[in-house]
Amino acid sequence: MKSFSRILTTSLLYLGFALSPMSNAQAAELQVIAGAGITAALNEIVSQFEKATGHKIVVRYGTAPQLVKMATTSPFDLGVCPEDVFKDAGARAQLTPEPMTNVARVGIGVAVKAGAAKPDISTPEALKQTLLNAKSIASIPATATGAQLAGIYERLGIAEEMKARIKVQPMPPNNITEAVAKGDAELGVFILNVLTDPRLDVVGQLPGELKREIVYTAGVAANTREPGAAKAFLTYLMSPDGAAAIKAKGMTPG
């Protein structure tokens, strides 16, 4: 009952935000900064929200360092970023003081080209050997996922060895999928929603105590010129429709 009440309340709040401004003012244009790993889900949600409200949303995607720079050097209305972005004091200072809202989460895993033999990653030691045996591993070190992986490689004691194996891919993240699918990289190691592709076989999440999730969190910019529309979009992200889009793109809502 509590879950149903929470969903009903969220839906009613969204309707109040989204519908009332349209009868009194012109549609707003919102500037959103967002982590590239949530692109597929967020693009779908943006499309739904624009159709429902008449507001226009422009999204700028980036890696964690790029998002910190965007937050601290250019105006925006809402951020939907990996939580590490807003651990940066300068970036967090650009948001309202209200608590951040967790929007989506996704695990980190390993994938191979469809049909290829799946390596053993069932234990930390098995994962270590698989990584050391791989000739090339597609990833994007500058992302929040890359930062998590760097810590894992340190923990496994293979940070130096991995430097020769990681085949750095350019943004956007689906270049990892392309590299593995074309055979340019033996493994893809990244968040699972990016690795989920018919041309790849997902081996699984990182094992045991190495299991990690990237959490995408959202907040309204303190200096937004469109606070009503920004809050409406944030509410829509947490609505049943928003959650359905997030889930459909291989992520877990909230």
Image: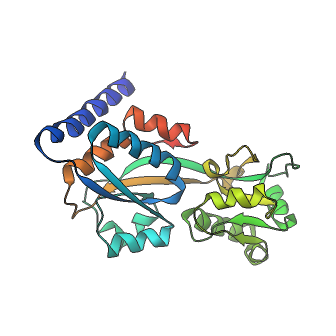
Question: Can you say whether 190 is above or below 135 in the image?
Answer: above
Q: Which residue occupies 81% across, 58% down? A: 125
Residue 189 visible in the shown view = no
Expressed as whole percent of the image width and height from the top left, the position of residue 211 reads 65, 52
Residue 28 x/y as whole percent: 23, 51
Protein image colouring: rainbow
Quadrant where the N terminus lies?
top left
Q: Nearer the viewer, residue 37 or 181?
A: 181
Q: Front-most of 90 and 68?
A: 68
State the image coordinates of residue 185 (x, y, percent, origin top left): 79, 63
Residue 3 or residue 67, whichever sits in front: 67
Q: Is residue 154 left or right of residue 84?
A: right
Q: Residue at x 65, y 64 (%)?
A: 149
Quarter of the rendering containing residue 183? bottom right
User: What residue is rendered at 51% in x and 52% in y?
Assistant: 38
Q: Nearer the viewer, residue 233 or 1?
A: 233
Q: Is residue 250 visible?
A: yes
* Viewport quadrant of the C terminus: top left
Quick check: 132 above or below 219?
A: below
Taking 130 as reference, is 57 left or right?
A: left
